[in-house]
Amino acid sequence: MKRRDVTGLAPTLDGSRVLMRVDYNVPLEPDGSVSDTARIEATLPTLRAILDRGGRPVLLSHLGRPKGKVVPSMSLAPVAPILADRLGAVVRFVPSTDTDEALAASEDLSPGEVLLLENTRFLPGETGNDPDLAARLARLGDLFVNDAFGSTHRAHASVVGVADHLRPAVAGLLVAKEIDALSGIREGCESPFVVILGGAKIGDKIGLLETFLRLADVVLIGGAMANTFLRARGLDTGRSLVEADAVEIAGRFLESGGDRLRLPSDLVVADPAAADASSARIVDAADIPPDLAALDIGPATREAFASIVREARTVFWNGPMGLFEKSGFDDGTVSVARAVAECTAAGGFTVIGGGDSAAAVRQAGLADSVSHVSTGGGASLEYLAHGALPGLEALDPA
Ligand code: ADP
Ligand code: MG
């Protein structure tokens, strides 16, 4: 269901503290520097909308999975100078969240400035949505904005619990844009609707196939996801990455999906420990050698998948077709990315979700050639499957 967003707030916020959940779960280099700033930049429109109205933004985010403990390498401190630079505003950073120091900093914040607090997942009650923690976090603001699309499928204290205590509670512009793109697909998209599913987070994603098989005309399976289906078909998958726990459910989808579910017919196999692709060769999907791993879809599969995608009117893609980070194993992912771009150029509506999938499309230089690149993997899949997300339900209705 559509939610009220920041454009529906009063034109002047009069110095109100706007507690804003963002998703600054950015990739860090070993030296601690931020290697991809896209998630920071994605929040600028909402921050500008709040600052323009005279609101004082207080930002909450998680980074990584510190599991309720302070892990210095997962501090949000490196984000503050980057945000200050991109926004052109003073960004104060306080290295705590649920403290008097953080509360005082929120009260002392000057108009035009932004306050960034420390990683919410350093707090023991965050992922369990502890109601006492949510109530304390709510004291950091006078109203609530959720612009953390990539976290909106998580019922965590800083995403869901906090919204019980603050009104208005509205969506940021990023969340609103993401929901617009995804509801376009859910609510009567044009046929043929093709879903492409790949990647390695098989356990997280496979359960959603039931819905995708219902919504889509064709579901193309690649990446390590495909290996799990090949195993379910009873084939030998050698040293390929397979999620053993998901083989049984994959087998059930093989039956219920019928010919709407398409698996690779050929694969690129190689020694998974080899440094490069020089030993790689192409085999039939039924002939994966026992000592090798399937690391990409083969040329016949690329051709078959690309021609289905080119003919589509709507495409949703999550999960790379292979080990695209390694050169020689990115051809499948790049071919599919090109086909999605061609579909878009021909008037199709195309959405790509997932951190690695988005990175692959950017790497191929095609991010501007598709309709929408989502900042959230799990969140986009879940919204598409269920039409609702816990963090959205917690906000004011439109
Ligand atoms: P996303 O982030 O787009 O949701 P995932 O996180 O599920 O995607 O999966 C991305 C990862 O899957 C990438 O690191 C990629 O190298 C890996 N991957 C894809 N296919 C294979 C394969 N056949 N074998 C091993 N890893 C694979
Ligand atoms: Mg990923």
Image (spheres, rainbow, N blue to C red):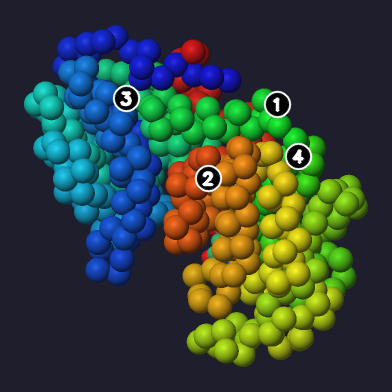
Where 67 falls versus 228 (above or below)? above
Mark 2 / mark 1, whichever is N-terminal: 1
Q: Which mark is residue 138?
A: 3
Ligand 1: give its quadrant: bottom right
**Quadrant position of residue 104:** top left
Q: Nearer the viewer, mark 2 or mark 1?
A: 2
User: Which residue is labeled 2 in the image?
Assistant: 370
Secondary structure category for the residue under label 1: loop
Residue at point 41%, 32% (across, down): 174
Q: Amino acid at mark 4?
A: Pro
Left or right, residue 56 beside residue 158: left
Secondary structure category for the residue under label 4: loop
Can the viewer see residue 374 in this picture? yes
Picture coordinates of residue 121 (x, y %)?
A: 37, 46
User: Which residue is labeled 4 in the image?
Assistant: 192
Find the distance from the CA under tag 2 to the CA under tag 1. Answer: 19 Å
- Whether the residues at callouts 1 and 3 have beta carbons within 8 Å, the answer is no
Find the distance from the CA under tag 3 to the CA under tag 4. Answer: 45 Å
Picture coordinates of residue 38 (x, y %)?
A: 35, 48
Mark 4 / mark 2, whichever is N-terminal: 4
Where 11 falls versus 67 (above or below)? above
Q: Residues within 10 Å of mark 1 (few under 14, many from 20)?
A: few
Picture coordinates of residue 67 (x, y %)?
A: 42, 52
Q: Amino acid at mark 1?
A: Gly
Where 181 falls versus 288 (above or below)? above
Q: Amino acid at mark 2?
A: Val
